[in-house]
Image (tube, rainbow, N blue to C red):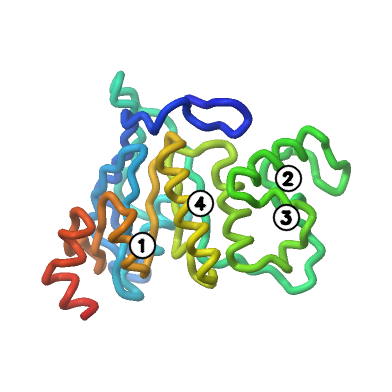
Amino acid sequence: MLKRSSSQKLESSACGFHCIKIKDISVNAGGQLIIDNINLHIHCGKITAIIGKNGAGKSTLIKAILGEIKHEGTIEFTDLRNNAVSNLKIGYVPQHMNIEKNTPMSVYDLFAAYISKVPVFLRKSSRTSKLINEQLRVFQAQDLIDKRVSDLSGGELQRVLLSIAITPIPNLLLLDEPISGVDRNGMNLFYQNIIKLKTDYDLAMIIVSHDFDFVRKYADHVILLEKVIIKEGTPEEVLDSEEFKSMFL
C-alpha cells in the first residue's frame, strides 16, 4: 500500500489498479437459499452500494465476504499492474455493537485491544496511545480517546469504529447500515468522512444502505439485491429503474 506520513494518506487519489473479484457467492442455511450466485468486481477508490428490502440477503453477503458464514464461491484481490493475486485485507464497521450500559471500557481500551498484542490492563503504551490518537484524528474523534464506549453517541461510536477499521489500511472496507442510529449532524460528518476515504485512501468500499439520497449522491455502483442481483449499474440506472420502483415505490 502507498502511504504518506502518520495519517497513512496517499500522495494522490486512490490508484485504481486494485480489483476485488467476488465470484459466484451463494449461501444456503437450513436448506434455504439466502443469496445466489453474486458476482461483483470492485476497484479501489470506488463505492459500491447494496440496497434491498429487509431479508434480501444484504447482511448475509457482508458476512460471507468476511468469512463469518459458510458459503460457496470465491473472493480474490488482484493487483492489475502485474496481475498478481494477494491476500485481501478487510475492514468492517457493523450496523450495531452491543455494549452494556456503564461498561468501563474506554475508547483507548477498545482500540488498543484491536491493534495491540499486549493486554490493555497490563500497561498503557505511549506508542500505542500515539497511534490511536493519530487514527482517531482522521475522523475528528481524538477527543474521545478517554471516553467510555458505552457513553458514546451513535455518531461518535461510528467515527471510532471507522478509525479502527482503517488500522491498518484495508483493501476493502465494509459498512453495514453505517448511519443507523446517527443524528443529522453525525450523518453529515459521515458523508464527509466517506469522501475522505474515497479520495485519500487506496481502498474500495461496500456500503449496505437504506438511505437512497446518500446512494444517489455518493455511490459509484449500485446493486439491487433480492437473494440474486435484480439490477445493477450507476445510481441513476438503478434508482430510476422499474425494478427499484416495483420494490420500493
User: Dot 3: few (<14), some (14–19), or many (≥20) neighbours within 10 Å?
Assistant: many
Q: Which of the 4 image quadrants contains residue 55?
A: bottom left
Picture disc at residue 144: 3
Q: Residue furthest bottom?
A: 249
What residue would you read off at disc 2? 112
Check the picture and name the quadrant holding the C terminus. Answer: bottom left
Q: Which of the 4 image quadrants contains residue 83?
A: top left
Q: Which of the 4 image quadrants contains residue 88?
A: top left
User: Dot 2: few (<14), some (14–19), or many (≥20) neighbours within 10 Å?
Assistant: many
Q: Position of residue 232 (x, y in %)?
A: 19, 57
Q: Position of residue 19 (x, y in %)?
A: 31, 35
Q: Disc 3 residue type? A: Leu
Q: Secondary structure at mark 2?
A: helix
Q: Secondary structure at mark 1?
A: helix
Q: Disc 4 residue type? A: Tyr
Q: Position of residue 16 (x, y in %)?
A: 32, 32
Mark 4 vs mark 2, CA separation in Å: 17 Å
Mark 1 vs mark 4, CA separation in Å: 19 Å
Q: Is residue 153 left or right of residue 178?
A: right
Q: Disc 2 residue type? A: Ala
Q: Is residue 105 left or right of residue 51?
A: right
What residue would you read off at disc 4? 92
Q: Secondary structure at mark 3?
A: helix
Q: Position of residue 238 (x, y in %)?
A: 18, 62
What residue would you read off at disc 1? 214
Q: Disc 1 residue type? A: Phe
Q: In this view of the protein, which residue sits in the foreground, 160 or 66? A: 160
Picture disc at residue 15: none
Mark 2 vs mark 1, CA separation in Å: 32 Å
Foreground tag (1 vs 4)? 1
